[in-house]
Image (cartoon, rainbow, N blue to C red):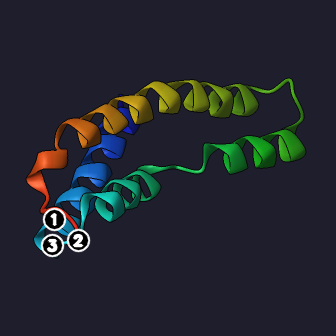
Amino acid sequence: MPLIIQTFLIFFIAYLWAKLWKLPHDVAAPAGMIRASNFFELAVAVAVSLFGLDPGATLATVVGVLVEVPVMLILVRIANKTRGWFELAK
């Protein structure tokens, strides 16, 4: 649960900050996504290389990836539905 809250919070901070800076939606949405990404792929690679495939640390990082994907898809949907908040690029 903390991972989900953190991801949403960081996304909205970056996304709304981009809106305050009057950035176009096609810049603000990816900025929020990149900022919210936790680089789980790197965490999995490090855990596997350090601990192997058996320990709980490796399992925990893999579960993190399984949580991140649906959360990021929800954030994509939110970004697409709030496209109207941003001025059209000139």
Front-lying residue, 63 or 26: 26
Whether tag 2 and tag 1 are in contact, CB under 8 A, the answer is yes
Residue 13 spot, x, y in % from top left:
22, 58
How many angstroms separate mark 1 from mark 3 (CA)?
A: 5 Å
Q: Which residue is mark 3?
A: 22
Residue 60 spot, x, y in % from top left:
63, 29
How many angstroms separate mark 2 from mark 3 (CA)?
A: 4 Å
Considering the numbered disc 2 on the image, is that residue within a helix, a strand or a loop? loop
Quarter occupied by residue 55: top right
Considering the numbered disc 1 on the image, is that residue within a helix, a strand or a loop? helix
Above or below — where is 33 with respect to 66?
A: below
Q: Which residue is mark 2?
A: 23
Residue type at the position of mark 3: Lys
Q: Residue at x 73, y 40 (%)?
A: 44
Residue type at the position of mark 1: Lys
* Residue count near mark 1 (Cα–Cα under 10 Å), binned few <14, some 14–19, many ≥20: some
Q: Which residue is mark 1?
A: 19
Question: In the shown orientation, is residue 17 left or right of residue 10?
Answer: left
Q: Residue at x 35, y 28 (%)?
A: 1
**Furthest-front residue in view?**
90
Residue type at the position of mark 2: Leu
